[in-house]
Image (cartoon, grey):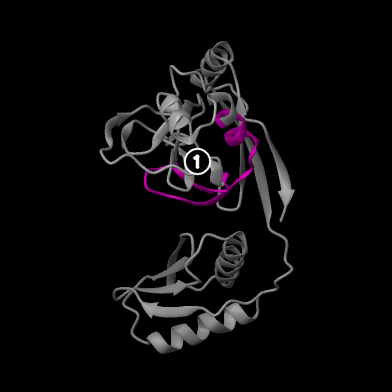
Amino acid sequence: MAFNLTYKPFGERAILIEWPFEIDEAILKDIMRFKESISQKKIKVIVELRHAYNSLLVVYYDVCRNYKKEVISLKSIYKSIKKKHDILSKLWKIPVCYDESFGIDLEYISNEKKHTKSEIVALHSKAIYTVYFVGFLPGFLYLGGLDERLYFPRKSTPRLKIEKGAVAIGGKQTGVYPSESPGGWNIIGNTPISFFDPKKEPHCFANAGDRIKFVPVSLKEYGDIKILVDAGVYELESEVIND
């Protein structure tokens, strides 16, 4: 499926390419294929490619003096993409403890949603989430796939301190805080897994297009896993999938 894309200047050294304004896996796959196709061309004047839910930013080394020529080149690359080309990705299984000592907003969400806490945990952990892109904080994964029964507004007053590993819901999204930071999402659990490690390469294990599955664990299991994570010997479970 080819989309009707728009191209516009983004400052003096970049071109912003936009898809329809929605969160959709077909759009994500199209962005990833386009991004990969541009990368394979090894165009010397392009220094970086960044994408979000429905856009791709092409950044050039120098001032983009011939904008129309560059747009024509990009459009030509887009037309040449093989739409049936498979994208290899991984399914990552993330242990999460939903105990109330971590899930400090579970009871509030339960009361507001008229679901038991066990039902909320079951709905959250049975879904397979798609990684759309990484941002906000290093290692923060923007995930799609939250069950609409768990949609819940962000807090009107953000907390000043959210613990590293906090698993949360904000609006129509769920995510994991990769480091201690302020935040306005509703906390329902915690994972002992590190989502960002500057000492490792790559710094974040997941990439756009990957899948995330949250696996409930007990407090004891959480503690056991954290010991292994802190010792640098924990092996995160994953499997390769084709899209």
Q: Residue at x 60, y 70 (%)?
A: 37
Q: Helix, strand or loop at disc 1?
A: loop
Question: Is the N terminus in the top left, top right, bottom left or bottom right quadrant?
Answer: bottom right
Q: As rendered, which of 115 and 4 lies closer to the eye?
A: 115
Q: As rendered, which of 173 and 162 lies closer to the eye?
A: 173
Q: Residue at x 55, y 42 (%)?
A: 149
Q: As rendered, which of 38 and 208 lies closer to the eye?
A: 208
Q: Residue at x 60, y 35 (%)?
A: 123
- Crowding at dot 1, Cα within 10 Å, few <14 / some 14-19 / many 20+, comes out as some
Residue receiving disc 1: 204
Count of picture labels: 1
> Picture quarter containing residue 69?
bottom left
Question: Is the C terminus in the top left, top right, bottom left or bottom right quadrant?
Answer: bottom right
Q: Please check the rendered image and state whether residue 144 is part of the magenta-colored stretch, yes or no.
A: yes
Q: Which residues are magenta?
A: 120-147
In the image, residue 194 lies at what x, y percent? Answer: 48, 30
Q: Residue at x 50, y 71 (%)?
A: 20
What amino acid type is highlighted by mark number 1? Cys
Left or right? Give the position of 187 relative to 33.
left
Q: Please check the rendered image and state whether residue 142 is part of the magenta-colored stretch, yes or no.
A: yes
Do we see residue 166 in this rendering? no
In the image, residue 153 lies at what x, y percent? Answer: 39, 44
Please tell me whether residue 242 is drawn above or below residue 197 in the rendered image.
Answer: below
